Amino acid sequence: MKIALLLPRSVIYPSMSFDIVDGLKSSLKKMGQDEKHEILTASIGVGSNNKEIYSCSEQLLLNNVDIIIAYINPEAAEYIQPLFESSGKLLIVLDSGYHFQNFEKKISNVNFISLQGSLCSRVIVNKAIEDGQNDFAITCSFYDAGYRPSYSFATAIEDKGARISYNHVTALQKSDFNLGPLEEFLENNNDTSILASFCGDMAEDFFKGSAKLKNIASCKTYGSGFTAEELWMGKIPYPGYDWSCAIPWSTNINSEENEVFKTALNGIKEQKANVFSLLGWEAALFIINSNGQTLDNITIDSPRGKVYMNPNTGFSEAPIYYATVTKNEETGNCILTDIIEVTNLEEERNRLHYHILALQNTTTNSWFNSYACLDS
């Protein structure tokens, strides 16, 4: 079988493409399937040009590729979907979960393996409310503000009858980064909790900045999935306070599948086991379990738990975990601890789907590039 990968680039995660490929190859090797598949790769920039992605996919399919795996957003997937329907081939989308699709029902010949970013944003609101918080300030980077975590925060807050008292977005330029307005608001609103969405070096800016500000540092803080992404958390100095997050996966999940995954990937290079190699690893598991046909209704045993491909939506459904970000005493930086699987996700999936549909056919803006994919 001939498998092609459409791979983006990112200055935030420069190893992203390599990690996806290594995850796929390592998973195939673990299953004894590596010799049976030819792997091709192609670059798609930051995943923002649908015409370029279409042309690249068309050429690969004309060269008899059986399956294309692409780290792209749902809008790009919908744009190129007719190619796969007409050729009878399969597109597997590796999805951050920070974009929303514009289609209501499953589109044919396409499946999404998702990190469930928006679902993480919803369930961390639930955690905050369970902790007794009901008044929130939402803060995010200029970059994250162009995606859907803040919308997911807001709709979850609305669903639970809580309220948003303040919205804060940091500047585009790092030189203009300023948490002062948020700090000033919290000075007179000390019962407010923070919901944060930052990515990579922007998360580093936020936590380094918050460590110097009394009101933010003393505030209960809850973060989205990528805010707590472990590659960056391990680089960020502990800000002097613990905070809570909801995540799709962690190196600290205690399972045999996770240990196998970490051993295989970290044997290639330190920190090679991450969310991007996880997506490649899962793609191989789905492909082998499907015998090259549809992925619908398949369940795999993943490093993050059992992952099910919903035949009605075409999106994978996987566990989500609560975690606490605290101090790594060995490095002085951040580390994720107290990993606990979230229960009763079905209602949250349904409410998320409801709010995705509610946004369709309305005038909204979003960045075109795949989440976390940026040029310098």
Image (cartoon, rainbow, N blue to C red):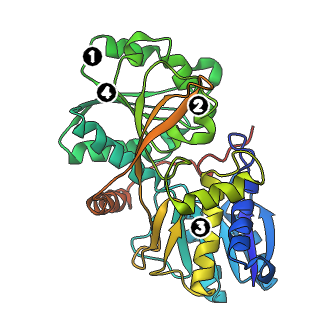
The three-letter code of the residue at mark 1 reads Asn
Give the quadrant of the N terminus: bottom right
Task: Pick whichever of labels 4 and 2 is earlier in the sequence.
Answer: 4
Q: CA distance from mark 4 to mark 3?
A: 35 Å
Residue 90 image offset from top left, x and y in percent: 62, 81
Contact? badges 1 and 4 (CB < 8 Å) = no
Of labels 4 and 3, the one closer to you: 3
Residue 212 seen anywhere in this rendered image of the structure: yes
Q: Residue at x 54, y 62 (%)?
A: 256
For the residue pair 178 and 191, the one nearer the viewer reads as: 191
Instruction: Tell me which corner region of the image, top left, top right, bottom left or bottom right, holds residue 322.
Output: top left
Q: Decide which of tag 2 and tag 3 comes sooner along the chain.
A: 2
Vertical relation: 327 (above or below) 28: above
Q: Are marks 1 and 3 in contact (CB under 8 Å)?
A: no
Mark 3 secondary-structure assignment: helix
The amino acid pointed to by label 4 is Ser
**Which quarter of the rendering shows the C terminus?**
top right
Which tag, 1 or 3, sits closer to the chain's start? 1
Give whichever of discs 4 and 3 has the lower sequence position.
4
Identify the residue under disc 3: 282
- State the residue position of label 1: 190
At label 3, which amino acid type do we have? Glu
Q: Which residue is mark 2?
A: 202
Residue underneath mark 4: 193
Quadrant of the rendered image containing residue 262: bottom right
Query: Which residue is depicted at the point 64% across and 65% down?
Result: 281
